Amino acid sequence: MTINALIIALALAILLYAAVALGPRPQRVRVRIEAPRDRRYRRRYR
């Protein structure tokens, strides 16, 4: 039971990571982080 739960959790985490990495969000986040106006946002984000 514990092994099954671990496998399911790992699969879900991998799927979420892949969706975020391959989705259209990374480009927007990248552009926003590269923007010079996001200096404050970057500080708060970190």
Image: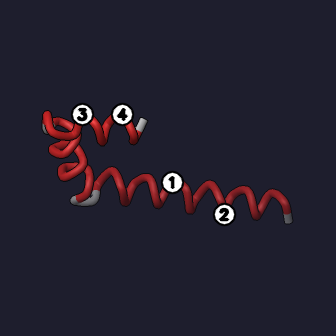
* Mark 2 surroundings within 10 Å by alpha-carbon count, few (fewer than 14), some (14 through 19), many (20 or more): few
Mark 4 or mark 1, which is nearer the start of the sequence? 1
Question: In which quadrant is the C terminus drawn?
Answer: top left
Is there CB contact under 8 Å for labels 2 and 1? Answer: no
Q: Look at 28% across and 37% down and name the residue there.
A: 40
10 Å crowding of disc 3: few (<14), some (14-19), many (20+): few
Q: Nearer the viewer, mark 3 or mark 1?
A: 3
Which circle's residue, 2 or 3, is located before the other in the chain?
Answer: 2
Asked if the residue at tag 3 contacts the one at tag 4, i.e. Cβ–Cβ closer than 8 Å, the answer is yes
Residue that label 2 marks: 8
Q: Amino acid at mark 3?
A: Arg
Left or right for 9, reference 29: right
- Identify the mark at residue 39; answer none if there is no mark: 3
The dot on residue 14 is 1
Q: Quadrant of the N terminus?
A: bottom right
Q: CA distance from mark 2 to mark 1?
A: 10 Å
Mark 2 near mark 4, Cβ–Cβ under 8 Å?
no
- SS label for mark 3: helix
Q: Which mark is residue 33?
A: none
